[in-house]
Image (cartoon, rainbow, N blue to C red):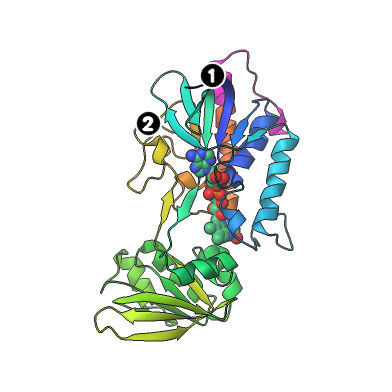
Amino acid sequence: MSETIEKVKCLIIGSGPAGYTAAIYAARANMKPVLYQGTQPGGQLTTTNEVENFPGYPDGITGPAMMMELQKQAERFETDVRNGWITKVDFSGDVHKVWVNGEKEIHCDTIIISTGASAKYLGLESEQKYLKLGGGVSACAVCDGFFYRKQEVVIVGAGDSACEEAHYLSKLCTKVTMLVRRDEFRASKIMSERVKNTENIEILFNTETEEVIGDGQVVTGVKVLNNQTKASHLIPATGFFVAIGHKPNTDIFKGFLDLDETGYIINAKPGTSKTNIAGVFVSGDAADHVYRQAITAAGTGCMAALDAERYLAAKDSTFEVSTSNYN
Ligand SMILES: Cc1cc2nc3c(=O)[nH]c(=O)nc-3n(C[C@H](O)[C@H](O)[C@H](O)COP(=O)(O)OP(=O)(O)OC[C@H]3O[C@@H](n4cnc5c(N)ncnc54)[C@H](O)[C@@H]3O)c2cc1C
């Protein structure tokens, strides 16, 4: 059974760029935020070696180092950063309740959800091996495409995002081979036509990945199988991009928050961080199937903290909107 119930003014769920940015703003506004890190302290960026597109790091920085800096900045303003996984929520009443690790119960005036999304992978052993080594497997063309300039890459996927990513890569790479499992795209006509009409993209329909080939350190090619003829062959490539979708980490909010068909949280009022429940706000990839970047996650983290601050001020006349976030 639960111990004494804790009361919190602002609870932040998640420790990626969205969560830590929300924490910096909420702490400076005197909201005394408590942040739960979840099972991946620092979020998705801790799985990448090089971040070159986050402003403020002219020489680039590793993902883990960048996330340590964000955590330090949040803690400098006395964010209470804790280990723990939010296992259950109840937003049905006036008080927003959450449970940590299935035990501890917390009642919150405001909640900022920054639980992110996870890229889907094929699950092949060779794919996971080179993903972990940082040796040429990626699920984000915008993040990593630059590292494959003037090289040949392979991309897997058949939807709009896969077409968009293939097209993005075609501007950087000498050749992009696109593997489509069925005999047609799932993407819209306009997106698939754009890919078909791009000279340096070769599309292989009815084709699946058998194995990502490498030298033990980096990817050197991809072995593919035609699922109709059963013939397999090797495509030389230094990069293997997987564009088969993302899964937002939002299962625990089902039944309380409005989610789209993939599970992304829907903003109740576009241009804000508000959800359909007053006092519950969302930031970062958990609500973003379009941009999915660290900088956009950080930006919406800031929005969520400012929205939460204004919500508290309107609800509680003793809570004053801080001026520290505006100067
Ligand atoms: C390999 C890779 C490389 C990338 N490279 C770049 C890049 O170079 N530049 C760039 O801009 N973007 C890059 N991205 C994208 C970027 O990482 C994401 O857009 C960004 O991290 C999203 O931030 P977020 O705060 O929304 O969520 P995330 O970073 O996904 O963090 C989610 C957090 O929520 C926590 N969490 C989830 N569920 C719970 C729960 N129930 N209870 C408690 N905590 C929970 C997790 O533990 C985690 O801390 C990359 C992504 C990947 C996978």
Q: Is mark 2 within 8 Å of ligand 1?
A: no
Image disc number at residue 5: 1
Which badge, 1 or 2, is on the more N-terminal residue? 1
Q: Which residue is mark 2?
A: 256
| Secondary-structure class at tag 2 | loop
**Neighbour tally class for label 2: few under 14, some 14-19, many 20 plus, Cα within 10 Å:** some
Which amino acid type corresponds to the residue marked 2 in the rendered image? Answer: Phe
Q: In the image, residue 14 lies at what x, y percent?
A: 55, 41
Query: Which residue is located at x 72 percent, y 36 percent?
Result: 75
Q: Nearer the viewer, residue 32 or 201?
A: 32
Compared with 32, 250 (above or below) is below
Q: Is mark 1 within 8 Å of ligand 1?
A: no
**Neighbour tally class for label 1: few under 14, some 14-19, many 20 plus, Cα within 10 Å:** few
Numbered marks: total: 2
Find residue 71 and report its image quarter: top right
Query: Which residue is located at x 37 percent, y 31 percent?
Result: 256
| Magenta-drawn segment | 310-327
